[in-house]
Image (tube, grey):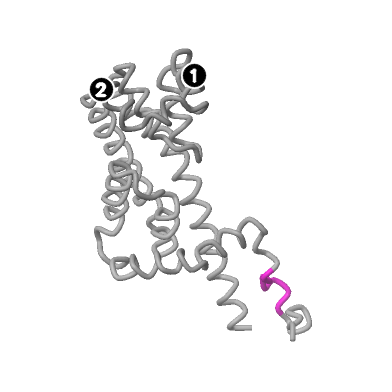
Amino acid sequence: MLIDHRAQGHPEAPRRSTIRPWQKWLLSWNDRPHGRALVKRLAPFADHRAFPLLGGILALGATVTMSFPLAPVVSALVALKPSRWRAIVFWAVLGSASGATALTYTFEILSLPLLNARMPELMSSRHWLHLVDWVSRSGWWVLAGVAASPIAQTPALVLAAMLEMPVWHVFLAVAVGKSVKYSLIARATQVVVTRAVHVNDTDHNA
């Protein structure tokens, strides 16, 4: 049964409706099986002083190995420690940019013939042709845009290596793009978790 806070003398008590739809969506993501599993794995480290550094290590590994997306990891880290979201973003950006730079350098060493032999579908894809056109016209800003978007950045890194883009350009572009992306994700998670805890405490004490 719903409690009317106004009838109980609590006119300013927030209700569950104060959580907006997009906030409920973000909460529901972390409550999905894979989200709960990720939070459970990271939870033992949450009280460590170097907890944000874990985001950087995971970001570096995820980028170099191209094994898993990092956005859910950033969200899970912030959900465990909302007050440290800025430090988590900093280390995640640093890890992603460092990993992307190392990966680009590796692609440059491999050279085009080997890449074409290993990833022929990439070289003939429409996504690849669009990237070639965009980068030739806009340079590293395209890479920054890809890093900030949900688009896979590996093809853009391959192209940056083929065009012999300076590694510091790659680092800067990915850092700028990931700063925007991870800051939005982390800040949204921090707001949602803080609001949810506040509402839950208010309902519990009502």
User: Farthest residue in the left direction?
Assistant: 109
Q: Is residue 8 left or right of residue 31?
A: right
Image coordinates of residue 190 in percent, x first then y, are 49, 57
Relative image position of residue 29 (x, y in whole percent): 54, 61
Quarter of the figure that contains the C terminus: bottom right
Q: Quadrant of residue 6?
A: bottom right
* Residue 64, placed above or below residue 55: above
Residue at image mark 2:
111
In the rendered image, residue 137, in percent from the top left (x then y), is placed at: 48, 13
> To which residue does mark 1 refer?
134
Q: What element carries label 1?
A: helix
Magenta span = 10-16
What numbered label is drawn on residue 55? Answer: none
Distance from the alpha carbon under mark 2 to that under mark 1:
21 Å
| Residue 103 appears left or right of 134 | left
Residue sitting nearer the eye, 109 or 36? 109
Callout 1, which amino acid?
Trp
